[in-house]
Structure formats: C-alpha cells, structure tokens
Amino acid sequence: MSKPSEPSKPLRILQVTCGLIHLPNQPQQLLAARRSVNMPEAGLWEFPGGKLEPDESPESCLVRELEEELGICVSVEQALTPVSQKQPTRILQLLPFICCLQQGQPEAREHDQIIWAGPAALLKLNWIPADLVILKEWLTLLNDPF
C-alpha cells in the first residue's frame, strides 16, 4: 500500500537586488561581474547586488550591497521588471535597477572579474539566465527610450 503524499511545502521567496551600473554621461556602458569559483553558478556573469534584508527597501539594499561588494556609491535611477527563477528549494526574485556610479572605483571583492562593456560586448558574455533577461530588457530600453 502506498503512503499518502505529504503536502508540498511552499517554496521560500528570496529577494535579491541587482544594479545595471553605468558611468555618468556613459549610459551605454554597464558594469558586469563574473561569479568566482567559491560562488554558486561560478564563471557566469551577473549584475552585482545582494539579498534584501527585513525592513529594507530594495533601493537601500542595492546601495548597501554595491558599497560592500564593489566599494562604490551609486544613485538608483530606474527600476526594471523583476525576474523570478524557480530553484530546487526556493524562488529567487531578482529586483533590477539602473544605477549611476557616483563615487569610487569598482573593486572585485567577491567576484573574480569585473568589466565595463557596451551592448555588443555584454551580449557575448555567458550570463546567469535571470540576468540575461534583465540585460535584454535594458537593450530594449536603449533602442526605444520612450
């Protein structure tokens, strides 16, 4: 006789911010970061950011995370469409924002490489799937900003 199946536990939602960071007066050059060997999805490219803490706005989370990860200060300019990705134990919700570098020079503190790149070079990188969705939305905005 088979056992009754247990009700499936709802997956936890993990909200993570990410920044599409550009230089002042250079909105078509973005900062991309490659995940290091000690990170999940090592070797894939992403837009840097981090986990949203309780009682923290996505914008303040992103500013904090970029200071911690890259040693920079940014201004948050525009939210893009959130992207959800189902993982085995949770749902990752990526909250993207276009940002402008205000202060500092980015340092790869957690990633093994960071680069500034324009649209053509960005498309050649091997992206985490959710970040690729965000990159494509940004490219659409570049071609039709209104």
Image (cartoon, rainbow, N blue to C red):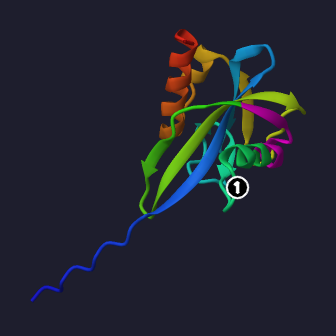
Residue 72 lies within the magenta run: yes
**Magenta span includes 78:** no
Q: Residues within 10 Å of mark 1 (few under 14, many from 20)?
A: few
**Horizontal side, residue 75 vs residue 42: left or right:** right
Compare residues 63 and 117 and report the one nearer the observer: 63
Question: Which amino acid does the dot numbered 1 rest on?
Answer: Glu
User: In this rendering, is residue 63 above or below 102?
Assistant: below
User: What is the quadrant of the N terminus in the image?
Assistant: bottom left
Quadrant placement of the C terminus: top right
Residue 71, compared with residue 52, is above or below; it is above
Quick one: which residue is furthest to the right in this view?
104
- Decide which of 102, 57 is in the foreground and name it: 57
Point out the residue furthest to the bottom here. Answer: 1
- Where residue 141 appears, as percent x and y from the top left, is 55, 17
The part of the image, by quadrant, that contains residue 46 is top right
Picture residue at 83% right of the left edge, 44% below the top: 67
Asked which secondary structure carries label 1, the reply is loop
Q: Is residue 110 left or right of residue 129?
A: right
- The residue wearing badge 1 is 56
Percent of width and height locating residue 112: 73, 42
**Residue 70 in sight:** yes
Residue 130, given in percent of the width and then of the height, sits at 49, 39
Q: Where does the image place residue 26, in percent across and percent down from the top left?
A: 75, 14
Q: Which residues are magenta?
A: 66-76
Task: State whether residue 36 appears in this view.
Answer: no
Query: What residue do we see at 55% from left, 45% from top?
Result: 94
